[in-house]
Image: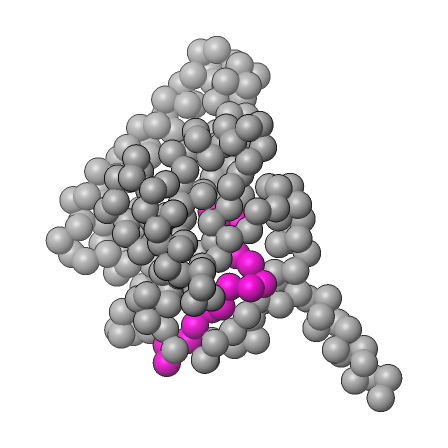
Amino acid sequence: LYNGKPITSNLDHFRPSSQLFPPAWRFRIFLSSLGIALALTAIFFAMFTFGARPVALHYWFPYLVTNGWLVLYTWLQHTSEHVPHYGDSEWTWVRGALCTIDRPYAELGGFFDWMHHHIGSTHVCHHLFSNLPCYNAVEATMHLRAYLEPKGLYNYDGRSTLHAMWQTAKNCHYVDGTEGTQYVKSIFTLVNETNAKKDS
């Protein structure tokens, strides 16, 4: 089921008739897919004109670095063994919004956090007040943190990006199910539990 209806065809982001989107969005999806096709055409035209190596160096390499960074950034903002995942019976909008982590990204004197308009260090506030302008987010986070932290509702991780990345990759692999409140666990915990059962 998707949106309470049976899936009768493939869902994708490219066909205007895809059941993934409401019918009123068909022209938008067409324009989006047309834009992607034109961009790919331009890239292949550039490869034939300038060669594969220059296009790889000037387009594909920066593209992979940028998208790798965005995936890393998003993953670290939303993944931690201390942040719960809620099933339908436990989830509320506020609980869902609080399931994120403020991280300082303090490397290079805070350059990364500054470059991203403090979205890393004000992410909890961003989830709760997504229309708040970024130039007010630092001050709003200060007040929000003072309110939420004593209640145990504020998530902050001051570790370096590399340390957080390593620990998250090592400890956050799966949840036991989709019901109730779940916390991400490490596959190594599952292996150790399985081995302990075999030994007993």
The colour scheme used here is one colour
Q: Is residue 105 magenta?
A: no
Picture coordinates of residue 47 (x, y %)? 47, 18
Task: State the quadrant of the C terminus.
Answer: bottom right
Q: Is residue 41 above or below residue 85?
A: above
Most foreground residue, 98 or 86:
98
Q: Is residue 32 placed above or below 145 in the rendered structure?
A: above
In the rendered structure, which segment of residues is drawn in magenta?
A: 74-89
Quarter of the image containing the N terminus?
A: bottom left
Residue shown at the point (61%, 46%) measured from the top left: 159
- In the rendered image, residue 28, in percent from the top left (x then y), is placed at 19, 43
Q: Quadrant of residue 174?
A: bottom right
Q: Residue at x 55, y 64 (%)?
A: 82
Q: Residue furthest top?
A: 50
Between 4 and 95, the one lying in front of the other is 95
Horizontal and vertical percent position of residue 187: 68, 66
Q: Residue 92: horizontal and vertical position, in percent?
A: 32, 71
Please indicate whether residue 28 sits to the left or right of residue 42 in the image.
left
Q: Is residue 43 visible?
A: yes
Residue 154: name its quadrant: bottom left
| Residue extending farthest right | 199
In the picture, measured across the screen, residue 151 lies left or right of residue 158, that is left
Going 37% across and 59% down the picture, which residue do you hit?
A: 147
Does 99 sit left or right of 127 as displayed? right
Question: Does residue 89 sit above or below 145 in this rendering?
Answer: below
